[in-house]
Image (tube, grey):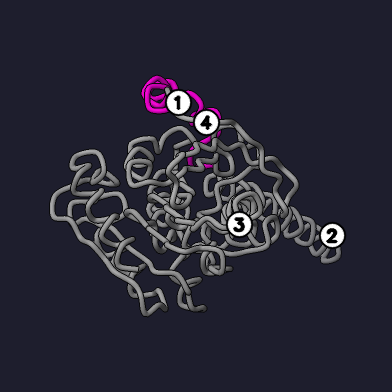
Amino acid sequence: MRRKLKIGLGVTLSIIIILFIAFSIFIGKATFDGMTENVSREVTNKELISYKEDYDDFAEGKDSKEIKIKSSEDGHEIPAVFIRNLQAKGICIMVHGMGGTKYSLYPQGQIFYDLGFSLLFYDQRNSGENLAPYNTYGVLESFDCLDAIAYIKKEYPDEKIILYGESYGGATSLIAASRDSSNIDYLILDCPLGDSREMVDEVLAKACEEEKIPQSFMSFLGNSFLKMKLGFGLEDIDSTKWARQTDISSPVLVINSKADTMTPYHMGREVYESINSSKKEIYTGEDFGHCEFSKIDPEGFKNLIGTFLDKY
């Protein structure tokens, strides 16, 4: 009787453990998917319809060509557009934000073009025509950014390079510069994403409230899947962490706004403070929204960028 009871308890315990493991795997995978698919590539292409005509108007009459840059890290192709300015005094590599594509930065692109720069726009991972999976808050995206820089350096070795990143692309640009800033002559971060764990925590808090699962448990499982599948953890999606660990040789301009609710004022400040550079500046607006400075006050934006570039 006792033996049967022990066997029964053992079987029951084994079933509970198996169910718990299965549940943990399911939750961990779901959390990982939520963390790395913030905006799907399909959605970015649907959104493209809303601004592609404006981009085409911007590109009309300019010397532009579509190119493919080979990823040195994962082997995928990085789709890009190069617009040559015949009076170019350098090249601006432009890194779009979450949900954007290589065509979405045309308002800022026009300003850099007017300042005398050629332009390189490219699709970040899991955006537009870039088939590389996962949104990784700039960690893996930074390798594509460095490949874009290397392409320009090889094709146009004598040109100065500006690296401009907006929002999510600001995190990509900062991490890329933290990995290697030797080929970057100027770094401009427009309303950059700082510690991306703030975004993740907000999403997890909402999911936990709906599913009645402890947030710490979901965070632990999601973090475990990140490390197993992609080789980094939640602690690595903080762009300021990368900046604090190195010196950035290029002059850096950080732009943020007290009215920004997507990457709040404190993020820009934290990004600025994390950068180890003797040539860094921060411009804080009072009333423009997220990455809206160049759109609501293009002349003011142009003057800010022009003054910064002339100074260094």
The disc at residue 4 is 2
| Alpha carbon separation for disc pair 2 and 3 | 79 Å
Is residue 139 shown above or below 70?
below
Q: Main secondary structure of the magenta part?
A: helix
Q: Which residue is mark 3?
A: 157
Location of residue 8 by image quarter: bottom right
Label 4 sits on a secondary structure element that is strand
- Which span of residues is magenta-colored? 37-60
- Residue type at mark 1? Leu
Query: Which quarter of the image is occupied by the N terminus?
Result: bottom right
Residue located at (29% from left, 62% from top)? 308
Find residue 253 and report its horizontal and vertical position in percent: 33, 63
Q: Is residue 197 magenta?
A: no
Q: Secondary structure at mark 1?
A: helix
**Disc 2 marks which amino acid?**
Lys
The image quadrant that residue 96 belongs to is: top left
| The C terminus, quarter of image | bottom left
Q: Which of 99/94 is in front? A: 94
Q: Is residue 68 above or below residue 250?
A: above
* Amino acid type, residue under disc 3 in the picture: Pro
Find residue 48 and name its label. Answer: 1
Disc 2 versus disc 3: nearer the observer:
3
